[in-house]
Image (cartoon, rainbow, N blue to C red):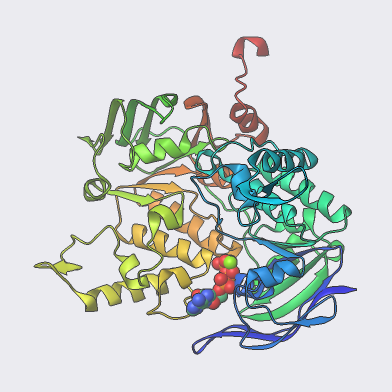
Amino acid sequence: MDIIKTENLTKKFGNFTANDNINLYIKENEIKCIVGENGAGKSTLMNMLYGVLKPTSGEIYIRNELVNFSSPSDAMAHGIGMVHQHFKLVPSLSVFENIVLGTEISKRTKGGIKLPLIDTKKELEVVRNLINEQNFELDPLSKIEDLSVGARQRVEILKMLYRKVDILILDEPTAVLIPQEVDQLILTLKKLRDLGKTIIVITHKLREVLALSDSVTVIKQGKVTGCVNTIDTNEKELAQMMVGRDVVLSIENNHECENNAKTLYEAKNITTLNSYGKKCVDNISFNLHENEILGIAGVEGNGQSELVKILTGLMESSDGQILLDGKDVTNKWPDELRNYGLGIIPEDRYKEGLCKTMSIAENCIAGYHSQNQVCNHGLLNKKNIKERRNQLINSFDIRVGDIDGEVGQLSGGNAQKIILARELHQNPKVLLACQPTRGVDIGSIEFIHKQLLNYRDEGHGVLLISSELSEIMSLSDRIMVMYKGKIIGEVCAKGATTQQLGLLMAGIVEDENNER
Ligand SMILES: Nc1ncnc2c1ncn2[C@@H]1O[C@H](COP(=O)(O)OP(=O)(O)OP(=O)(O)O)[C@@H](O)[C@H]1O
Ligand SMILES: [Mg+2]
């Protein structure tokens, strides 16, 4: 039986058609993957199924019943739950408080009468049981703000399971996960399917589509362009269906490990403590040369985020020194760092890279307001700014529905491309690239990777921080691995193996003496 069926489902934003007569069929108890380029309309479609967006026309049937959702709570009442591309948790509340939020359990008298008091003990117990059932590594009492992204996602999933949904939609759940977490999520989702749930997953990673799903639907420019059973397809065919051409899934890079060129960027013994007084960046030193991509690999939560915060002026280093092109830039402000020639692609695109409620044009100059072309005598030069916007959009093939709209309306991958285009346009001496292709489609990844290699070949330096090991391995010249706030090892990218890096990421250093 089709548990979900849509007929000619259409969504327009003004004159722009994001979903164009979509006929989608989801079988009960299957794992369906939805794939397609950035801006194809995947999230829009899911948001209609979840009651976040109202269709412009067309029908949605759930278990053969025609539905007309006004809000996610209507969808939830039909057993549909969704974990969004960008999580919707309350950072200052604990795990269990987030899970029960809106459906708190009241205390009762011995006679069973509801009291106007929350029974936190009971809530905690219920959430603990749920965590144990799923075998998740999660402390119900931790605050969301202290959790890794992977752990936050587990909270989002639990939140849905707590509400007893039987159709679970996940929008790019693996974009933020490290490989081990991805494998764990795949197992979790398969287990949920085996328990009778229906699961819809949007992803850009074809390996995951093949490992996870029963069937795949391809969306291109708002239309369904293909639907196949997973066993009948492969990565190459899916890439073709999505992009309409062959995509180079692995890039050629003539890695140089020995680089005697000038040092562009240098960190000497930088150290910092987190809010609990624990050393999260511990005596880190590195040298980045001209014409070099230095990768930093590591399991998320091993100090990479804090290291980036120090390097980008968002956190203070309590010790050590940072030199950019020979100048001391230790603990400088982000705008000063930009003036010294540092381009920044932050880890969290919406928190640190963009302002969602501002226009695309304003975001294209964010961080560069002091430039003459942008601002003269305290007045913004709107014409120049629009020209720059158009140039960036064209050069990076950024798909925007409404060019004068807010950045918050862009699809995830296109928003990411705005940051990349903006930072590379400045031609900085050094680019700090954190998760540069997170949420970006395969065709655009190919493009961005080429841009980064070209930029390096022009003589610049890139510090690449990514949880995508394959990205680190294919782009870097040298790779350092971070573990528990320290650099635990360094290898040449040429000849490095996943296994070798995986061991370092797990904190295991091979003793050279034992090899003999
Ligand atoms: N509220 C909105 N107002 C105007 N345009 C919108 C709005 N929401 C989405 N769009 C546009 O609709 C198109 C489809 O967006 P959607 O988020 O569904 O893409 P997607 O397939 O999920 O892409 P990605 O892989 O990058 O997440 C995009 O061009 C986007 O700019
Ligand atoms: Mg999306």
Relative height, residue 359 to residue 340 (above, below): below
Which residue is at the front of the view, 86 or 125?
125
The residue positioned 69% from the left and 36% from the top of the image is 137
Relative height, residue 323 to residue 7 (above, below): above
Q: Quadrant of ligand 1?
A: bottom right
Residue 313 placement (x, y as % from top left): 30, 41
Residue 463 placement (x, y as % from top left): 41, 42
Which residue is at the front of the view, 475 or 416?
416
The residue positioned 30% from the left and 61% from the top of the image is 366
Label tally: 0
Residue 395 placement (x, y as % from top left): 41, 70
Residue 166 placement (x, y as % from top left): 80, 61
Q: Quadrant of residue 242?
A: bottom right
Task: Give the quadrant of the C terminus.
Answer: top right
Q: Tell me if residue 498 can be seen.
A: yes
Relative height, residue 213 to residue 115 (above, below): below
Which residue is at the front of the view, 513 or 400?
400
